[in-house]
């Protein structure tokens, strides 16, 4: 996966994705909360292969020694952690295992905005998995790079073996262009079931901005709709009013 340095120009986005090969980091400040630890050994991986089940306890609750908070991690998050640990271990699992540090909340802040994302399996007794717009640079049929954007559901935030904190997400099956959302106000999409390609662990720099997503009731199990953000409503309705005026007067758009 390559993340380009092109941001959506039509949006006042807080995060500008950068090229992964540049080796620099996004110019944002990260704050992660809701920390938990997992020591993944070969035995744990074998257990997860048969039954992906993992209960963790928040680090803060362990320190308080009272009101301990235990959580059952999302099954897809466990599968992705297992895949990432195998990748990092390169087939040679250390005897003591590989450390994974996870978080249930990530706050991203720069000079003019502050965005909070949740990926919590039990926030006050309920699941809370936020949505984001992920930016990829992919090759088209001719091998030329093309920018594509995928509505994605966040599953967690993890650091493997003391590496950088990255996002864990499940993306849509197809790219959804921002221009389409601006035009239609609502845009339908489906979350992908392709674990190999659309369940990802990637840099936080791939996140463009949060999304408002609602289930597409009447659609399939993985059917959802992304809603145009409120900050863009005035422009949308203004364009609609102007369009109707032009149609009524017989004036065509140039």
Image (cartoon, rainbow, N blue to C red):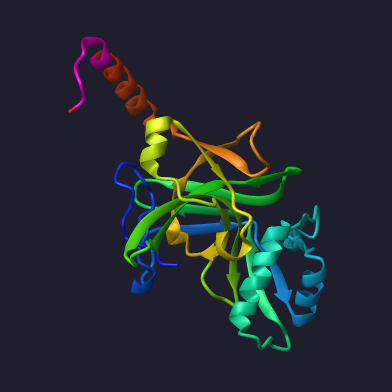
Q: On the picture, is 140 further left or further right than 222? A: left
Q: Which picture quadrant has residue 64?
A: bottom right
Which quadrant of the figure contains the N terminus? bottom left
Residue that extends furthest to the front in the rendered view of this protein: 141
- Residue 244 covered by magenta stretch: no
Viewer-nearest residue: 47 or 143: 143
Residue 59's x, y, as percent?
70, 63
Q: On the picture, is 169 further left or further right than 127? A: left
Magenta stretch? 246-253
Which quadrant of the figure contains the C terminus? top left
Residue pictured at 73% horizontal, 63% vertical: 63
Residue pictured at 60% horizontal, 73% vertical: 160
Viewer-nearest residue: 196 or 5: 196
Viewer-nearest residue: 34 or 75: 75
Q: On the picture, is 112 further left or further right than 32? A: left
Residue 3's x, y, as percent?
39, 63
- Reply above or below: 114 against 75: above
Residue pictured at 73% horizontal, 89% vertical: 95
Residue 131's x, y, as percent?
55, 46
Residue that extends furthest to the top in the rendered view of this protein: 248
Residue pictured at 32% horizontal, 60% vertical: 5
């Amino acid at each position: 996966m390559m993340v380009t340095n092109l941001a959506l120009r039509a949006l006042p986005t807080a995060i500008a994705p950068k090229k992964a090969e540049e080796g620099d980091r996004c110019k944002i400040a990260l704050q992660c909360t809701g920390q938990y630890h997992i020591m993944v050994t070969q035995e744990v991986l074998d257990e997860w292969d048969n039954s992906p089940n993992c209960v963790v306890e928040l680090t803060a609750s362990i320190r308080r020694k009272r009101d301990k908070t235990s959580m059952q991690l999302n099954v897809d998050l466990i599968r992705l952690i297992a895949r990432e640990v195998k990748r990092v271990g390169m087939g040679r699992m250390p005897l003591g295992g590989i450390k994974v540090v996870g978080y249930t909340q990530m706050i991203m802040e720069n000079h003019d905005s502050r965005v909070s994302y949740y990926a919590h399996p039990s926030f006050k007794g309920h699941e809370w998995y936020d949505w984001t717009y992920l930016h990829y640079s992919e090759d088209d049929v001719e091998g030329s790079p093309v920018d594509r954007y995928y509505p994605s559901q966040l599953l967690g935030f993890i650091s493997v073996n003391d590496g950088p904190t990255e996002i864990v997400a499940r993306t849509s099956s197809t790219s959804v262009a921002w221009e389409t959302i601006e035009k239609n106000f609502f845009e339908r999409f489906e979350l992908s079931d392709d674990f190999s390609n659309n369940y990802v662990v990637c840099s936080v720099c791939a996140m463009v901005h949060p999304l408002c997503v609602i289930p597409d009731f009447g659609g399939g199990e993985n059917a959802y709709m992304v809603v145009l953000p409120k900050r863009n409503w005035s422009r949308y309705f203004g364009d609609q009013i102007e369009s109707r005026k032009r149609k009524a007067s017989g004036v065509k758009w140039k």
